[in-house]
Image (tube, helix red, strand yellow):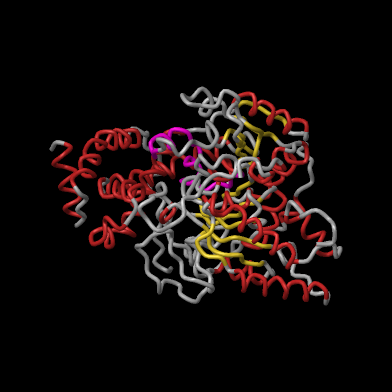
Amino acid sequence: MDAETTVRTLFNLAGVSPPEAEMAAFIEGYPATRASLDLLYAVPDTPLTDGILVFRPAD
Amino acid sequence: MTGSPQPFTITEAAAALRAGEVTSVELTEACFAAADRFDETLGVYIKRYDDTALAAAATADAELAAGTDKGPLHGIPIGIKDIIACTESETTANSVVYDPDWYAGADAPVISRLRAAGAVLTGKVTTMEYAIGLPDVTKPYPVPRNPWDPATWPGGSSSGSGAGVAAGMFMAALGTDTGGSIRIPAAFCGITGMKQTYGLVPKAGCLPLGVTLDHIGPMTRSVADAAAMLGIMAGFDPADPSMPPGVAGEDYPTMLTGDLSGMRIGVDRANHLGKEGADPMLAARLDESVAALAEAGATVVDATLPMFDELTQACMITMAVEAFAFHRGWMAERWGDYGLGMRSWVGTGALYTAADYAQAQKVRRIGAAKLAELFSTVDLMAMPTCAAGSPSYDGLDMGAIVGLIYTPYWNPVGCPVLSLPMGLGATGMPLSLSIAGPAFADGLVLQAGDAFQRLTSHHRATPPLLAGVGA
């Protein structure tokens, strides 16, 4: 899916409708957004992968 | 006032109050006089509490005269960032999109603690909208400006807190920090700011930006003042579920010995120097600061923070997603009522997937473990807070700011970080040193910062505006 379709779809799913000028800026910036995520997915896994959000049923 | 000059720090004011050299009413009146003089230029206050503040000051004076001493904040004028609730007025978050009934008529726990300690609350001060973005001149809120040069941004998001302390409009302030919002304005305004360990100070009654990254912390003129405030603010409150049960602060002021003998401090130049747009004086100021830490007795070694870019990105993603989750309903109905800077930033939270968010949390966990390994070899880390001083409003955008700040690294790992002045840069604007430590080593961080300030005078420098130049 290209950046424009993805960004419009994600905003649509969220129920948010930025005006076209701002939508264009989000679309333009989206490749950089994805690139920043690549950095995170490139982090090697370790045994400490249970996430920082801990669910405690007694809380 | 009895002929003595206005005390510069809380610590000095506390001594002067008890010596009968000044009254809390005089301190508070002096702060309001500074606000009368500078606020039109600096855009600090959203709401002043003149009447209730002066009444609280008079009460403090009477209590002190009667021998009732509530500690170091008794009778001290303090400003409040307007995302933290207090009974005197509603909490606007510097936005036209807010719920006037949220925490209406109630104090956030941290405000209750300041009030019980006898602090004098002078009013609510400007923030970037919901603690993110940049000022939007189309919205009905003041544009905060830096006392060192009103053509520049004072930093954010705790803009009014930083500018107000630097301009003497209050002796200290509460700020909040999700990716640097205490430390950046402290750096740009030439004051001291502390982001303590996550979960040490209750953040109930504070509008969230990124709930797993947010902190309420002190902004002051000295490390000793920050230690005094943190000692009162810290400790468990059941209203904040992110706090470890039973967590408690320490008697931080007694930990400020000035002696760093036996302490090993790592200095990270690799992630912090040589950046495009950096102040030409940055490396020299860092070297001078490191020399001062060594003079205080510390052993200083080179060290490199692990996963610097990854944790910085994890902060940005977590912040955007958590903020968007909070604002989604209002953004669906009132997008244009938010300022452009705020909605442009928070709107990106819609563009990440649940898996992206989960991965960011995993990276936080891995990064925290690697950082713990580093802190098994050094007690503390030191580095610049930002690459340069306060940027001009002319052409300012969030992208440029993000490129100049080093602060977001520390929020995903929750460690305590102190931001303190380390001299002026090539443009004459303040530069800032950060000192960080492992979780709950807040006292150690404060000890190092205080030792630094005993050997330097950067924190006592005041903006030219206060002398009338450029006023």
Task: Please provide percent x and percent y for residue A12.
Answer: 16, 52
Residue stretch rendered in magenta on the structure = B397-418
Q: Depth check: B59 or B432 in front?
A: B59
Q: Residue at x 34, y 46 (%)?
A: B345
B100 up-or-down from A23: above or below: below
Q: Is residue B213 left or right of residue B441?
A: left
Q: Residue at x 43, y 60 (%)?
A: B93
Please identify the quarter of the rendering in which residue B336 is found: bottom left
Q: Is residue B93 left or right of residue B441?
A: left
Quadrant position of the C terminus of chain B in the picture: top right
Quadrant position of the N terminus of chain B in the picture: bottom right
Task: Please provide percent x and percent y for residue A29.
Answer: 27, 36
Task: Please provide percent x and percent y for residue B134.
Answer: 41, 46
Q: Residue at x 63, y 28 (%)?
A: B286
Q: Is residue B32 left or right of residue B86?
A: right
Task: Please provide percent x and percent y for residue B61.
Answer: 77, 72
Q: Is residue B333 magenta?
A: no
B144 up-or-down from B421: above or below: below
Please identify the quarter of the rendering in which residue B99 is found: bottom left
Please identify the quarter of the rendering in which residue B449 is found: top right
- Res. B360 visible in picture: yes
Q: Is residue B173 left or right of residue B295?
A: left
